[in-house]
Image (tube, rainbow, N blue to C red):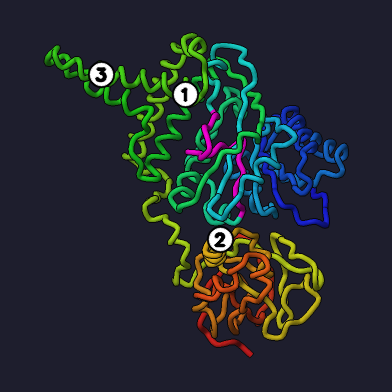
Amino acid sequence: MIHENATVPDVSVIVPSCNRSEMLRTCLAALAGQSHSNFEVVVIDDGSTDNTPEMVAELARAHPKLKLISLRNETNLGANPSRNRGITASSGRFVAFIDSDCIAEPQWLESLTSAFTSGRVAAVVGRVEDAPPRNIFDLAALGTHRIPGPKANRLIGGNMCIRRDLLLQYRLDEDRSSQTYRSDGSIDTTVSGRGDEEGLSLSLRAAGYDLLVAPNAVALHVHHYGFRAYFKQAYKSGTSAARLVYKYHLCPRLDLAPWMLAYATLPLSLLDLRLAGVAIAFFAAAVAAIVYNELFRKGKTAGQLLRAFPVLIAYYHVRLAGYLGEAIRLRVSGGSIKRVRLSQMSRTDTTPTTSGTGTIRAIAYRPTSGEPMREITECVVAERKGLALEDRNHGKREVTFLSQEAWIDACRDAGGDIPWTTRRANFLVSRIDLAACIGKAIVIGNVRVWIHGETKPCQLMDDQIPGLRRAMKPGLRGGVHGQITSGGLIRVGDTAKLDPSPPKH
C-alpha cells in the first residue's frame, strides 16, 4: 500500500513492528503530527499475527496527508532485516528510525535532520525518555538508551537518523541477532536484540564520520519489563555482545571485563590468601563501573541506584553468562557470522575497487525536462532508448552511472553534502571503477549497457556547492554514460559486472 506524493521526500522514517498494533497506532499518530513537512513513513510488519495490517490501513485513511508505505514480511525476520528492507524501499535523502513502542514529539524529525550541518556528519541520535517505571525492573533499565552529547559514542535504533547514501554502503548487521520466543511459540516482543545498530555505528566511526546527538529530538519509550523479560533481555544482550566482539575483532566488552577478571583470579586465593586482594580489586572495579555507568551515563539518582543495585548485579551476571556461552560457541564452531576488521574500513576505502563487480545502490529518473529526479526501486530499460519512464532519446547518452564512493569523496572535498540525485544520474553504483568501464559493457542481469564516455560535470554543480565541479573531475567522479544494447529489468541491489566483450550489432 503506497500513498503517492508528487514531492520527493527529504526524510524516510522506518518503523519495524511485530504484534504491537496499538503501540504502533500511537507511534504513527505521533508521526502524522510532525512539524517537518516533507517526509514519508515506511512501516514493516514483521510477520505480525495480530490486526496490524488492518490498523495501518485504518490509520492511513484517517491521515490522508501522511505518505505511508506499508510492507509485510510473511515470516518474522527480526529488526535489522526489516529495517534494511525499509531502507531499500525508502527514497529520502535521510533515513530516520523509530521503534513502534516509541512516541515522537512534534519537533522530533525536524530536530534530527537540522543537526546534519556538514558532510562529516553521518548520523544523529535523539534523546530517548523512558516512561515512568512501574517496578524494580523498569527502574533498573531506566536510562539505558541515554546518550550524552554533543558527539554520540553509539547509535540507538529507536531514535536515530542516518544519511541514506551511507546506509546503502554500510548496512545494518543481519547476522548477529536471533529471535526470542515464548513457551507457546510466538515471538517475544518484550525482548530485543540489544545493540543491533552497534555494527553500523562502529563502521561509520571507523570510516571517519561523526555521530552527533540532537537533544531536542525527543521520543518517549514505552516499554515495561517483568522479571522474566528483564533477565531474558540480559542474557540476549550478552550473546549479542559476544557476536559483536567476534565479528569485528574487538576486545572484550568493558562492562564485562572486570567481572571476567575477578572470577578468573578468584582461584588464586585458594593458593595464597594474600592473592585474594587481586580478585577483590577486580570485583571492586566491576562495582565501580556499574555505579559510574548508572549515575553519569544513564542519569539515575543515587536513590534510584541504591534501590536497583541488587537487580543490576544480577543483570550483569546473567549478561556475563550469555556473553561467555556465546563467545565459547563462536570460537568452537565459528557460526555463520562474516568477520570484519574495522582497521580496514577507513574513509579512503571509498575508492572504487577494480574487481569489475559492483552493486546497484539506487535508481532515479526525471519525468520531464526541468523536474527534479525521482528515486525508484526498479526500472525497465529498452534497447536504443534508455529508461522506459523517460520518454526521450539521448543518443549515446541513454543512461548514466554515478559511483557512490566517488560522489561521497567529491562532496567531502568540496565541503558540502547534497543528495546524489542532484547529479541527475540514473544509477548509483558501488564498488566498481567506472573509469575502467569506458569502451566496455556493464552487465546487470539480462541488461547490457555499452559505456561510451565520461559524463562531464557542468556549472550547475558549482551552483549547488562552490568548488564541486572541480572536485568531480579527478577519476571520473562525475560518472559515465552509455547506450542500452540489451534491455530488461534493473532493481536496487542487483549486481553490476564489467564485461570487456565488444558490443553486439
How much space separates mark 1 and mark 3, taking CA atoms?
Answer: 22 Å
* Residue type (three-letter) at the residue carrying disc 2: Gly
Residue marked by disc 2: 415
Residue at image position (70%, 42%) is: 110
Q: Which mark is residue 281?
A: 3
> Looking at the image, can residue 154 be seen?
no
Hey, what amino acid is under mark 1?
Answer: Phe
SS class, disc 2:
loop
Q: Amino acid at mark 3?
A: Ala
Q: Earlier in the sequence, mark 1 or mark 3?
A: 3
Q: Secondary structure at mark 3?
A: helix
Name the front one of labels 2 and 1.
2
Q: Provide the residue span drawn in magenta.
A: 145-164
Left or right of 23 in this view: 452 = left
Quarter of the image where the C terminus is located: bottom right
Q: Position of residue 254 (x, y in %)?
A: 36, 31
Q: Which residue is mark 1?
A: 296
SS of the residue at dot 1? helix
What's the CA distance linking mark 2 and mark 3? 50 Å
Earlier sequence position, callout 2 versus callout 3: 3
Is 159 covered by the magenta stretch? yes
Which quadrant of the figure has residue 480?
bottom right
Q: Position of residue 130 (x, y in %)?
A: 62, 23
Residue 324 falls inside the magenta stretch: no
- The answer to whether 134 is drawn above or below residue 126 in the figure is above
| Labels 1 & 3 near each other (Cβ < 8 A) | no
Q: Position of residue 241 (x, y in %)?
A: 43, 34
Quadrant position of residue 106: top right
Determine crowd level at label 3: few under 14, some 14-19, many 20+ residues with C-alpha closer than 10 A. some
Name the residue located 33 percent from the left edge and 38 percent from the top edge. 251
